[in-house]
Each structure stands twice: as structure tokens, then as C-alpha cells.
Amino acid sequence: MLTTSRYQKWLISSAAVMALSFAASLSQAQETAPAPEPASDEPIQEVVVVGVRGSVARAVKLKRDATTVQDSISALELGMFPDDNVADSLSHITGVSISRTAGGEGQKVSVRGLGPEYTLSTFNGRILATDGAGRDFAYDVLPSDVISGADVIKGAEAANTEGAIGGLINLRSASPFDKRGPHGIVRIEGDRNQMSDLDGKKLSGVYSTTFADDKFGVLLGVVLEERDDRTDIAGNDGGWTRNPVPDTDWYGNAWGGNIDPNNNGKLDEDEYGLIAPGQFRVGSILEQKKRSAYTAKLEWRPSDNFRLVVDGLTTKLDSPQVGYQQSFYPLYAPGRWSNMQIQNGIVTSFDMDNPDPEMRLNPELLNQTSYRVVDTSLYGVNAAWNVSDSLTLTGDLYRSTSSRHSGGQDSYVVLRMNQANTAHIELTGAYVPNVTVNFDDGRDLASGLAKGQFTDSDFNTHYFSLAGDNIDDEINGAAFSGKWQVGKSWFDSLQFGLNYTDRKKSRDLVNNSLTGGADYYSGDNAINVGDLNADVISHSFSLPNFMSEVSGNFPRTFLAFDIASYQKALAGYDGNLRLDGEPYDYAAAAPVWNPLQSYRVGEKTWSGYVQANLEGERWSGNVGVRVVQTNTTAQAWDAKILDIIENGAFNFIAVYADPTSVQQDNKYTYILPSANLNYRITDELRLRLGAARTMARPSVETLAPTNTTESISWGEFTQIYGGNAALKPYSADQFDASLEWYFSKNSILNFAAFSKHIEDQITRSWEPGQDIGVPGHLFNISRPINGDYAKVKGIEIGLQHFLDNGLGVRAQYTRNWSKSWVGDEERPLEGIAPSVYSLGVFYDHGKVSLSLTGDHTDGFVTAINVLGAGYNEQSDPITWVTAHASYKVNDSLDISLEGQNLLDEANTYSINGNPLLPQGYNRYGASYKLGVSYRF
């Protein structure tokens, strides 16, 4: 909330902008003759309505007419976006970067380097419900065909919905009155991924018409899409092991014992902070994606003074993912490793030749599934009434929902090899270490997998996690606004409004970790898979181009098993005696509701605003204030740990007391002033200045006092708290300046600078060695906290230009500098890319349209202090290249070809950029899409 000193700064900032506005108006009044109206404010006589040129022209006009710093994208025409996904299209905008889901599809959006949690997404000004645990919208649930454009609003105005510090992204749907009369488009597409040799298809259509003397309009849209994706992956599930560093806050995470190269049983000085592999895996995720969307809009315009719009959108994303992976767990324990080689504090090579079955390397088959079926809907009614020539009133009611019910249907299932072997592990700087496993019977892992030499009897049951959450998000909103045209002196108009939002979000985690069911099949209770008599190992994978971009010696063929068939085989084994003499009980490992990570969060928000719009002969601007009050109610559950049972090396079960409910309430009020100035230096050159106080609410799951100790299962004694309702929103004082040169029709060169002073930024604390009341065990504790503050400063440069011969260029560069502080500790601000830039070239003339665009995102920190202070996980740089070509056969028919990820780039992660410490690898391959469109 605003302190007195902060509020004084705001008064000064607002007064400064108003003073500039008044000075501008005074200087104009002293001129002997008024300057002519700039050409940009006159009605456009000719507009190209289709193709790349039309899309760029509309985007430039929207930027020019905006009242604050803004960039936009527009569809090539009704029902057609230049990219397969809205997020991909947004990535071409200055200062925007995206993250990708399986298959390489854009999913989460960041603005000006600030992560998705700083960004608010709306659809026609209405907040979109989300299927994730937070507020950031997953754009893969929304086909691009259902929108006509999007505005990325980087400045701030009192009249805009609060909740964004990075930027407000408003998606716009088309209106049947955009082009009167009947018309529509049908489009058929097919795509092919060059890496995976997998195909997809899509059918989309939009129909729009007006009738009854253009008093009624109807727009209908449908999208039906199916595609198969593959993502090759590698990563570290168990993370890296690092020895303690005395006299620091790092107590180490070497769960099997401190890494001891000289085997003297103590931690020597040269062993402080020594790093070595924990667990790593390599494999592929296969996804069968089905997506459908239906849209409808009805508009009634009985007169020029009244408009009523009823609209709806419903989408369904059915996107199950199955990951087939080979997993290795070489976690250090005394006597487990030999012949260690060390380079710059990292164990880069070692042998594993201990004959003890629990101490040798036991390669594992990992089947990891994600059951993601998301239903999203948005329905609303909006009315606008011109009460008089000077007063317009608008009302809006809407309901937005999102649900994903995957409880107990996500799996992480491991089968462990049980044959005596010796192994060698070596870090090479590739994303997968070298792995050599030689079995005592003469087989080796890599060639044995390739030749099909392994069967069910070579594996034991091990880990069987069934999980998933049921998430329901419901938003009911109402808005009333008005605009009073004053028209006196420089006071042009007054805007005012009142908004109400009631959001309810619930998460029910359903898994088998709390009951120990995930570990029910491990250690002494393991069952030989061959005894199930069910041919559990279903097939061997030898995928085309699998990990072809990654060097190294590791198995590139791997076995797979189907979860449903495996469960059926286990159910048939029910009642058989296990090694402990007890009968096997299939139901004992069933998933149940886990209260410790379930929650109910409710938010009721009132906001009101007043904004004065000012205008002089060569300038315009606004000054206003928005007041926001939010009441939060959060419910979660807690359960004390009564005992921890050790079943073997790296295998523990926690025994919990009965859960008890925990409820927290919070209330906060924020005053958010803003001021903007748009000064026309010349007819072509504009200067924008803006100052505002903004806020972004904490992610929903961080408001619930949940906790988890699931890491106990594999020997890491860590308690992770999800959050608490008392967390404050992020808040920021932000300043924007933008110089825009509209040097020719539909062309612009702009330079912008921005500064944000963020308070109460949310980060995580790490408190090692804490006594939480479990005898014999100390725990590391992690919890979200409000940090002290962060500073983000940056610049943006953008260029859009088309020549008369059809050639065009679009380029953008964003650079920011960010720092944050928690106490006296300076930390990098997570999720902020230091630079984002792109370059696109176009040709659009006659029947031919061509474009080629490259978008580059620099490396950035994704998580801090993962191995102690200064050891941060970071995303490595990536460049994403797309291309589009279309040919207009006639006025009704055109053919297009699009390419995605033409450089075949992968998303990669590491610790501090060190190639010897890879964290993750995701490769999607290049893909191509052929489409045919028919207009009528």
C-alpha cells in the first residue's frame, strides 16, 4: 500500500506530467495561427484489409491511436492469424517472450522480461480463468482462430483493469459489424514434424452476417484440431548433490552421506561444496492433442445510440502426454563410487562396482504421464448507451470458468533392473552424461536395449506414484463505466467506472504419496515383473532422430510399458505373498485425496476509477486514480509427522497424524494513480510519457497455507510451504517514455525506456537444518516470502516498414537490467530475460505473401540458490525461426505453407550456464503446415 512518502512522490509525478501538458497547451495558445490537424487523425481513405500488410497497418494504427504505451497484433483477416498460436504471434511484439509446452507450442507469455506472474490476460476486457495453480493464462487452451487481435498494454491507466506490472494483454474478438453482410472463411490445415515424422490436422471456420437493416449481427466460429507431438527430453529429477560449506547457510543435500573422494569418513576442506550427479533421465514425451473451440456473438444495434452484445466462447483441450524414459539414480553413498575424477569442484567421472544390489547402479524404466484435459469458457453480455451527445454509459456482466480434473490420473512409475552389473558415469558437457552399464551375464545396457535382449524378468517393481489435481477456477465479474464529454478548454472528457470480481479457485490433490503407496512396491517388497505373467514390457522404442543433436554415449533405444496394462497385471497379482510374508494388497497403493496440498481460495475485489482525459492542439493525455480493495479467504490442511520409517537406502515413509483445517483471511487496499502525456512534436513524431503505480496479485497457490514433505520418500528431508493469505501483492512505481516516428504510411520507428521499482516481490526462503518436531531428523524449510524490493530498467527499439514494392521489415530489441534484494542479499530477479529481440522480413504484393521471422530470447535465471547462494538454475538462450508463404489463387481461394522452429532449436537449462551442470533439455523439431482457405 502507499506510504505517505510514496503518495507524495505520486502527487509530484502526476503534477509533473500535468505541468508538461499545461505547458504544451500554453505554448500552442501563444501561436499566431493554429497548426493543421496531423494527417494521422484524419479518416483513413484506403486500408488494406487482408494479408501481412493489412495486419501490420492495423497494428501501427492501433499503436498510434493508443492513449498509453502499447503494441498490437491483428489477424491477417477474419479467422486467420499469421502463426499457429496466439502466444507465438505475441512473441513478435517488442518486449514479449514466451515459454513453450510439449511439442514446442507457445504457452506462457512474459512482457518486458517480467515473468507470466506479472502479466494479466483478458478477453474483451474480461479476466480469463486458468487451469493452472496460478493466474497466468495458458495460451495453448485457446486457438488463435477465435480472436481478431491482441493489445499488449505496457503503460498504465486508471481505466484499465489492475493486476499487471509487466503488461496487460487484452485479446479481442471480431464483430459481425466489422464487415457488414454475409461472409465467412473455411480453412483446412495439415502439419508434419520433421524430427518425429508425426502429423496433425485442423479444420476451422467463421461465418458472420448482419440483417434486419443492419440492426442485428451474428458471428459464429468453430475450430477442430488434432495433432501428434513428440518432445525429446533429458533432465535431473533428483537434482545435483552438493556437500555442505561450513560457516555458510548451505548445509548440503548429500542425502546418502557427504561425497568423500578419499574415503576418510570426514568432510575435508577440499571437499567443501563438492558437486556430483544425483538422478538424471533421458527419453521422449508423446502427446496426442485434440483441441476444439466454439464461439458465438450476437449484436443488436437498434439505433446509433445503443448497442447490446451477447457473446460466448468455449474451448476444450484434450492433451494427454506420455513420457517414456530411461532413468539413472547414481546418488552417492559411502562405498558406492570408486575412481572419482574431479574438475573445478565437480565430480565428472566415477565407477559403480559395489556388488551390493542396493549400492550398484540399477537402471530404471520411467513412464511419466500427464492427463491434461481442460475445459474453458467465457460468457458475457455488454451494453453501451449514448444517453446524450455528451454521456455514454456501458455495463458488462461475465462469467469465466476453467476446470482440469486429473486427480489420480497422472503417473510417475518406475521399473528397476535387477541384474548384477558394473557401471561408469561421466559428465562431458553434453545434456546427457555418458552411461556405460555392463551386466555380469555379458550383456551391456545400450546394445542390449537395441537388440531386444531384456524382458520382464530383468525388472522389479519399484516406484508407483499416481497423482494429479482437480482444479476449478470460477470468475464472476461486473463492470459499470461511463464517459462524459466535457469539451471545455483542455478538459476533453471524464471517464469513471466501478468493477466487481468474485473469484473462487480450488485445488484437490489426489495421489498415493501421503499413504506411502508410491513406495509400496520398492525395497524388500519388490515384485519381479516376470512373476506378473502379463507381458508388461510392451515394446521397444527406436524413435527417428532421437536425441540426434546431443552427443555422448548413452542408450538411445529404450523399453516402454503401458500404465493401464501394468495396473491390470498388478490387480491380478492381488493376494500373493510378498517377501515380508504379508499378502500383497493392490488397493493399498491406490490414490486418495491429499489434504496437505489441497486448498480453497476466494477473492472478492471492488475497484473504482476516475480518469480525466485532456487534450490540446498538439497534445493529449490523461490523469486518474484507481482504488482497489480485495478480501481474500484461504483454506488448507496440515498434518504433523508422527514417525519416519526407513525401508532401505533412499526409501522412507512418513507417518502422519490426522489432518486439521487451517483458514486464513486477509484484506488489502491499494491506491493506484496514473498519468500519461502524448505530445505531437510534429505530424509524424510523437512523445509519450507515463507514470503510474501498478500491482500484481500473488499467484493463487501462494495464498493457501499448504505444505508438502513428499521428498522424504527418497531421503530429502525438506518441508515446502505453498504460501499464506497474508502475502502482499507485488507493487511497482513505473515510468515510461516512448518516442515514436511515423515516417511513412503504416510505418514506425520507436524508442522507449521504462523503469519499475517493485516492492514486495515474491521469492522463496531457504532455511536449512530446522527442527519441526520429528525426532532424529532436521528439515530444510522453503516458503514463499515477500522480498524487500526489485529494480527493473530497460529500453525498447522497434521498427515496422513496408516499401511500395511489397517488401517490408519488422524488428524489435528489448534490453533490461534487473536486481532484487531480500534483506541485505542481492539476488537476480527470477523469470526475467535480459534481452529479447527479433527480426522479420516480408513480401506482400499481388497474389504472393512471404515472411520470415526470427525471435531470440537471451538466457535468464529461472530459480535461485538451487545448490546454495549463487547457484542458480537458468534457461539458456534460444532463437525461434518461423516462415509463412501464401498464394492467392483467386478472390475466394488461397494456399499457404508455414514453418515453425526452422533452426530445430531446443529449450535447455543449466546451473549458472555451466555445461557440466545441465538441468534440462527439450527438443521439439521443425514442423511445417500446409493450409487451404476458402472465402465466401
Image (cartoon, helix red, strand yellow):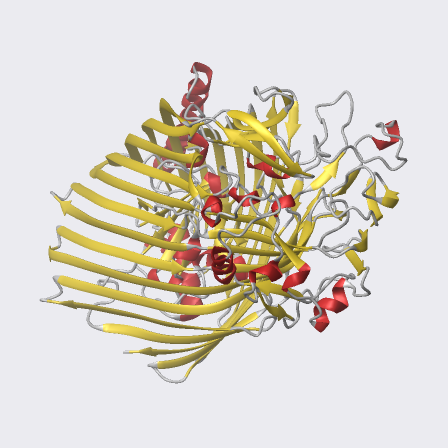
Asked if 720 appears above or below 303 in the picture, the reply is above
Give the left or right position of residue 434, taking residue 640 as reference: right
Q: Could you say which quadrant of the image residue 219 lies in?
A: bottom left
Q: Could you say which quadrant of the image residue 336 lies in?
A: top right
Q: Position of residue 667 (x, y in %)?
A: 35, 22
Seen at 81% across and 60% down, the residue is 438
Asked if 903 appears above or below 241 in the picture, the reply is below
Give the left or right position of residue 216, taking residue 164 as reference: left
Seen at 59% across and 38% down, the residue is 713
Q: Could you say which quadrant of the image residue 147 lies in?
A: bottom left
Q: Position of residue 18 (x, y in %)?
A: 39, 29
Seen at 62% across and 58% down, the residue is 325
Q: Position of residue 339 (x, y in %)?
A: 89, 46
Q: Is residue 60 visible?
A: no
- Residue in front for this viewpoint, 884 or 750: 884
Q: Is residue 216 visible?
A: yes
Give the left or right position of residue 29, taking residue 89 as reference: left
- Residue in front for this viewpoint, 464 or 575: 575
Q: Quadrant of the N terminus?
A: top left
Residue farthest to the top, as pictured: 4
Q: How many marks?
A: 0
Q: Position of residue 341 (x, y in %)?
A: 88, 45
Seen at 45% across and 66% down, the residue is 82
Q: Quadrant of the C terminus?
A: bottom left
Residue farthest to the bottom, as pictured: 889
